[in-house]
Image (tube, rainbow, N blue to C red):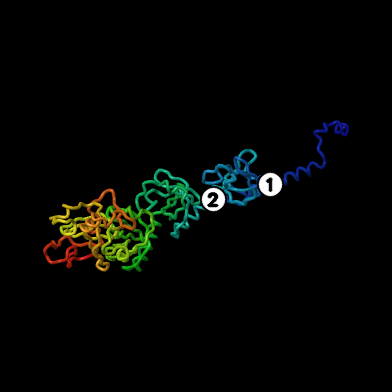
Amino acid sequence: MDDRHDEERDPMTQQDPHQGDADHEMGMEESMSYAMLEEVHPGEIVEGKVVHISNDGVLVDVGAKSEGIIHLQDLSHRRVERPEDVVSLGDTIRVYVVSYEGEEGILRLSKRRADEQEAWTRLESLMNEGEVIEATVTEVVKGGLVVDVGLRGFVPASHVAKGFVNDLNPFLGQTVRVRVIEIDRNKRRAILSRKRVLEEESRVSHDALWSNIEEGQVRSGTVKSLTDFGAFIDLGGVDGLLHISEMSWGRIKHPSEIIKVGEVISVKVLRLDREKEKISLGLRQVRPNPWDTVAERYVPEQICRGKVVRLAAFGAFVELEPGIDGLVHISQLADRRIQVPAEEVTVGDSIYVKVLYVDPEQRRISLSKHQADVDIIAGDFVPDQEGEHTAELGEDAEEPRLNAYHAGDWEDEQPELADEGEEEGDAPSDSPHS
């Protein structure tokens, strides 16, 4: 009965004599798998290989039972549109183990958090060592700049430059040199300063420049700013003043006629005040002096056209070309005796003059309007003929300041020469020259 009863049992309930061995083997595999999973713990940073890339993220083999997933937002601290912008198939990367999710224990990973943890450690070391690092500006936000230092670092507006910066947008995309000044991991805050780097570099340049600068040197500098009275030139950590009177051999009304901000120019060191740390510079001194070759362009009896640029009690100064002025003595202005030059000419007039004599060494040219008029009336000279020297005439002519004259300048305080026994047209013999 017992045997028949055993034979009548439901075959589904009967146990295979080898079933025990199979169950034992399966249990061993599962135990090994879970053991492998236990080797990868949340909070760890491990290496893995990118085995699959999709639009939403990537799968990474870290040696666990199944691949771990990195969602798109966990790939980088930067905004990412495509996973391929960060990783490629087959890449070996370091990832942070976030957690096991769901009933199946899906392994969630983060490359961003792994990168950030390593970046925090690196930044702390750099801050302690006082090292300077390079960072790319990724965003311009209210109050400063966001930079990429392996995580989102912040440069406050007050630490962007040595002075106030009104518009930070030009920094977007630039790589800047910064120093780490504050770190707070708990608040995920990394503060950096570009200003401190600039200040330190400026101090080094400042000391180096003052240790070897000398009067008479010709140096290269960058035009930093323009004013009505001149320009400030950055010589490399130290600014020098280029006065408007030292910019050109001719007359200019504003420095912008000669130079522009950002331009690199060569200047001569004219004067140094080491105690007050002031440097006076000259631009015209490194450019050709028109008086060096004036005798090649102007000879006695030559008739030229020029512009009246200044009146004095003893005559009128006429600009023949930028940097070259001649004097028409009051006795040579007209065919009659006049009391003041203004009776015959005014500042800004374009007139013809005859060269009486040229003295390059003293930087003097004596001119005569009266004699030029006589030759023109007699037909001995035809105005505007080929080869005639003509000064460039401006639309507006204002009497320039005396300290802007560098050539052909006589003092105003001169006695009239009429009836004094001096040759007509000669300049006073005791007058100083620039």
Whether residue 279 can be seen here = no
Question: At 30% across and 58% down in the image, what residue appears?
Answer: 322
Q: Residue furthest left?
A: 419
Kindly identify the amino acid type of the residue bearing the numbered disc 2. Asp
Front position in the image: 356 or 433 = 356
Question: At 87% across and 33% down in the image, what residue appears?
Answer: 7
Left or right: 64, with 386 as reference point: right
Q: Position of residue 346 (x, y in %)?
A: 20, 51
Front position in the image: 336 or 86 = 336
Front position in the image: 261 or 100 = 261
Residue denoted by label 1: 33
- Classify 297 as above or below 382: below
Q: Residues within 10 Å of mark 2 (few under 14, many from 20)?
A: many
Q: Earlier in the sequence, mark 2 or mark 1?
A: 1
Residue denoted by label 2: 115
Kindly identify the amino acid type of the residue bearing the numbered disc 1. Ser
| Quadrant (top left, top right, bottom left, bottom right) of the N terminus | top right
